[in-house]
Structure formats: structure tokens, C-alpha cells
Image (spheres, rainbow, N blue to C red):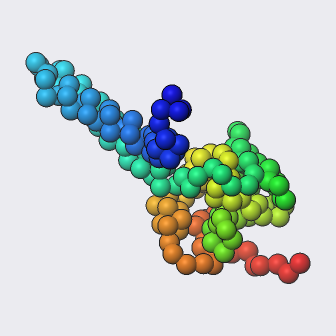
Amino acid sequence: MSGFIRPEACALLRRWREALAGAGIVALGALIWVVALGWVVAGFGAIVALGGVGLLLLGLQRGRFRSGEDGPGIVTVTEGRLMYFGPLSGGVADLDDVTEVTLDRDGRPGHWQIAHQSGPPLHIPVTATGTDGLFDAFAGLPGFDTEAMLRALRAPGTGRLRVWQRPGRTPARPRLH
């Protein structure tokens, strides 16, 4: 089947897969609601459609977060531990120890700079393989604003944008090497 669909179209469908599934569930719920013969079945259709709306909204956020997976390195998030294995650098950080998430837009591709208490910050390219796991990892941080992160990803310009800082912490001062 991979030869039947162009690779660009496959990548686009893969990027927006949750949103497409949500739209399909909304359509199914609306169909059930429209052809329902009683209020119980119509209520079930409405509930299915509302669940589809939730999946559609989540899928739109995830689709906006994805930047491709053709960059250097591999990211894994397992049981509250973030690991990055890159060609030149890497590291491990427990999500409970993360103090700050910054988007560094100066590099090509841009990098997530993740400061944590147990070592030097991790520098993870936004296009690294497995960055989908960062969406859920970031969402689990206390007070994290997903929309602010998505705006930072799409904002024009260069420089660093602080996306999140652990509540009650002062900003880290840049260190001289």
C-alpha cells in the first residue's frame, strides 16, 4: 500500500492522524444522531460526536506539534524519564527534575532546551525521531500551557523562548563554560 500513496501524502496523513480519526468519529456520531429512532439512540450519537470533538481538538494540537522526524537523534519517554540519544550529545532527565523548557530557534532545526536539576540541559532537535513523546511529557508538567508551546513553535524569528518554568523557581542564569 505504501507504493499506492505518495510519500508526501502519507506523511501528511500521519501528521494529522488523530484529527482525522476525530473528524470521522464526529461524522459517525452525527449520523447516529440524525437517523436515530428514539431519544436513547440519539443521545448515544451525541455522546459519540462529543467524544469525536475531543479527539479532533487533541489531534489538531498534536498535528501542530509535529515537525517531522528526519532530524538527528532519538527521543524516548519511559515512566517519567526523558532520554535523548543524539549523534553528538545526549542525556537523561527525570520529568520530576525538569525546571525549565525553552525553545532555541537559532539552530537548524530548532532545539528544545530542557533544564533539569540532575545535570546539564538536554538539547533535543524538534525534528528528532520520537519527539511525539515530548508532547505528552510536557503536558504532564505542572502549569504547562500547551497552546503557548504551539505558538512558540510557529513564531517567526530567532532566539530563545521560554515555554515553561517550574512554579516557584527563579530563572537559571546562563553559565560560562
Tell me where residue 77 appears, x and y as whole percent. 69, 43
Q: Is residue 43 visible?
A: no
Name the residue nearer the viewer: 133 or 175: 133
Name the one closer to the observer, 141 or 132.
132
Rendered-image quadrant of the C terminus: bottom right
Q: How many marks?
A: 0
Q: Is residue 40 above or below residue 66?
A: above
Question: For residue 125, what is the image quadrant?
Answer: bottom right
Residue 80: x and y, percent? 70, 44
Q: In this rendered view, identify the residue nearer to me: 176 or 170.
A: 176
Residue at the image point whose x is 60% and y is 78% from the top = 158
The image shows residue 26 at horizontal and vertical percentages of 28, 36
Say left or right for 8 vs 36: right
Q: Does residue 172 appear to the left or right of 164 in the view shown?
A: right
Toward the top, the furthest residue is 37
Which of the pair 101/1 is nearer the observer? 1
Q: Which residue is at the far left?
A: 37
Q: Which residue is rendered at x = 71% and y = 44% of the image?
A: 76
Tell me what residue is drawn at x 50 percent, y 58 percent: 146
Q: Is residue 60 above or below residue 4?
A: below
Asked if residue 35 is positioned above or below residue 162 in the image, the reply reads above
- For residue 95, side relative to residue 50 (left or right): right
- Residue 22 in which image quadrant: top left
Tell me, yes or no, if residue 160 can be seen here: yes
Residue lying at the far front in this picture: please name it: 3
Residue occupying image coordinates x 49% and y 41%: 6
Q: Which residue is at the far bottom?
A: 176
| Residue 39 position (above or below residue 123) | above
Q: Position of residue 165 (x, y in %)?
A: 62, 66
Q: Is residue 143 left or right of residue 21?
A: right
